[in-house]
Image (cartoon, coloured by chain):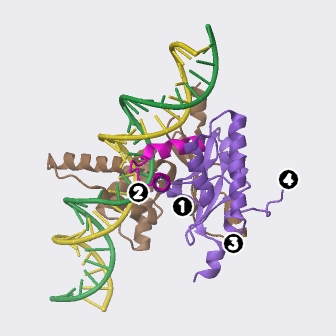
Chain colours: A purple, B brown, C yellow, D green
Amino acid sequence: MSEDNTQHCIAFEQHDHSQCQSQSMRHAKTLCENRRVKLTPRRLQVLTLLTQSHQPMGAYEILDCLNQQVVEMEGKKSQSIAPPIVYRALEFLLAEGLVHRIESKNAFISCDHPGHHYAAQFLICSGCEKVAELDSPDSSLLTKADNLGFKVDHSVVEITGVCRDCNKNGA
Amino acid sequence: MSEDNTQHCIAFEQHDHSQCQSQSMRHAKTLCENRRVKLTPRRLQVLTLLTQSHQPMGAYEILDCLNQQVVEMEGKKSQSIAPPIVYRALEFLLAEGLVHRIESKNAFISCDHPGHHYAAQFLICSGCEKVAELDSPDSSLLTKADNLGFKVDHSVVEITGVCRDCNKNGA
DNA sequence: ACTCATAGTGTTATATTATAACGGTTTTAG
DNA sequence: CTAAAACCGTTATAATATAACACTATGAGT
């Protein structure tokens, strides 16, 4: 077991993001193959956007990006993509645990720690707007629920505040 | 200090709700007096609705209730109340910690445990739709954040699942 | 290869949740 | 008593999300 203070919080740290991103994509592909579910072009496209940004994106922000890409590819074919396209791709990605929903921002973020996506926990900086996924889910809460005879399905843990860097830089 | 297993979860238990409700209202009034902030008729009206229901209500659900009450009081004066009225009352009640926002339901619920509203935690039953506020905030999460140099502002903890009663009754 | 069932996509329309902006009224402080 | 601030009411609109339906691609069994 890893001790409690080796907390990784990659989104708040310097890292080679292009590598981090391609690793996420590779992982997603294997995961989908193993589960015999389809990472279709649309889903891949949305997941790619999310892993690239490494930050939460609203559904309509994603939508805009898709439309942007359509324009780029087709000169000016004008027919634009509609919301359900995005929401459906997100629904799939959420179900497979490849993406999380940040409830307090109505936004979506790619998963950093595939494995315990059922109990993800986030730190949300109100300074830089970065969101970091903690990697050691806190079981005390879930056992507390369990003690009450409550069968846990899904947990939302979102801590808003100011990250270390913003504390330093800000007033 | 109370031991960890004396968890109160009043919303999931039988209780004299009219008493529970009037106690909440009394508490709210004293609190506002002490803070020199105004629990105006509108705010009182919204808080009353929320404490009566003891369950989360959407802003537009609250709005409908208000309009209902207008009709009852005035025969049929037709002029109906608009969303900002409700959102403003809620904004005040949230700021004073008398009400919580349930992010995963876009809904609002009156506070059961004035005192540690900054770190409320909720169990949300998907069977009966009841929501219970836990009374012992879990600090481990907040200290974890602290260790990362993250200055916590507000925490959202919402556990969705099936409560004991629904487990018994359901399949 | 054929055919039906299913899953995925695209499209239109609309529902739901939330806020901006402005003007009037009440309350409060000086 | 007056000026500033807080509160309220109203209109309009923004932002987020889903329902419903038609079409296409995929896949499983024959």
- C-beta proximity under 8 Å, tags 4 and 3: no
Q: Is the magenta stretch mostly helix, strand or loop?
A: helix
Side of B78 relative to A24 (left or right): left
| Viewer-side residue, B90 vs A106 | A106
**Quarter-wise, where is residue D1 in the image?**
bottom left
| Viewer-side residue, D14 vs A80 | A80
Residue A83 lies in the magenta-colored region? yes
| Viewer-side residue, A48 vs C23 | A48
For discs 4 and 2, the disc positioned in front in the rendered view = 4
- Give the spatial CA distance, label 4 vs label 3: 23 Å
**Quarter-wise, where is residue B135 in the image?**
bottom right
Residue B6 visible (yes or no): no
Disc marking residue A1:
4
Given the image, what chain letter belongs to the residue carrying mark 1?
B
Side of C21 relative to A112 (left or right): left
Given the image, what chain letter belongs to the residue carrying mark 3?
B
Q: Which residue is drawn at 32% across and 55% down?
A: B45
Same chain shared by disc 4 and disc 2: no
Same chain shared by disc 2 and disc 3: yes
- Give the spatial CA distance, label 1 vs label 3: 22 Å
Disc 2 marks which residue? Answer: B25
For discs 1 and 3, the disc positioned in front in the rendered view = 3
**Quarter-wise, where is residue A38 in the image?**
top right
